[in-house]
Image: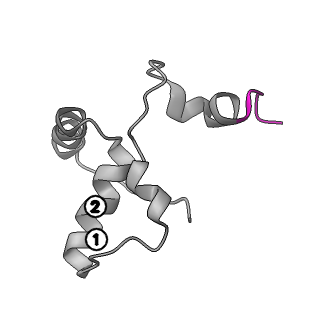
């Protein structure tokens, strides 16, 4: 998987965050699904990604501290 960065208008970002919460998925998963629809992708190349966003840490800053959350240590 490739990590990327995009710029969004504030209102679009807030609306997308609300929609992700409504669906119970991460913002990143919402973006992947939306791009998949636009590009016509019907299947996941990595079936395990169907579970992306299914578990929440409860930490609102988890995306900023992914190494600590995933690996149990701070980024070197």
Give the spatial CA distance, label 2 vs label 1.
Answer: 5 Å
Question: Residue, x 43% and y 33% (percent of image)?
Answer: 55
Residue range highlighted in magenta: 71-76
Label 2: state its secondary structure: helix
Say which quadrant the C terminus sits in: top right
Question: Residue, x 28% and y 61% (percent of image)?
Answer: 33
> Is residue 70 shown left or right of residue 16?
right
Name the residue carrying label 2.
33
Q: Are marks 2 and 1 in contact (CB under 8 Å)?
A: yes
Say which quadrant the N terminus sits in: bottom right
The percent position of residue 27, horizontal first and vertical second, equals 33, 43
The percent position of residue 45, horizontal first and vertical second, equals 46, 74
3 w.r.t. 10: above or below: below
Question: Residue, x 76% and y 35% (percent of image)?
Answer: 75
Q: Is residue 24 magenta?
A: no
Q: Nearer the viewer, residue 3 or 54?
A: 54
Give the class, few, some or many, for how many residues have Cα within 10 Å of label 1's Cα (few <14, many ≥20): some
37 w.r.t. 31: above or below: below
Which residue ends up furthest to the bottom in the rendered image? 40
Does the magenta stretch mainly form a helix, a strand or a loop?
loop
> Is residue 59 shown left or right of residue 18?
right
Question: Residue, x 65% and y 35% (percent of image)?
Answer: 70
Q: How many marks?
A: 2
Numbered badge on residue 36: 1
Corner quadrant of residue 6: bottom left
Numbered badge on residue 63: none
The percent position of residue 30, horizontal first and vertical second, equals 28, 51
């Amino acid at each position: 998987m490739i990590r990327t960065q995009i710029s969004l208008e504030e209102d679009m970002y807030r609306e997308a965050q609300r929609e992700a919460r409504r669906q119970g998925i991460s913002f990143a998963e919402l973006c992947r699904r939306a791009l998949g629809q636009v590009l016509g992708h019907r299947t996941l190349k990595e079936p395990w990604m169907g579970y992306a966003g299914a578990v929440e840490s409860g930490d609102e800053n988890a995306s900023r501290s992914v190494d600590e959350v995933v690996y149990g240590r701070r980024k070197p």
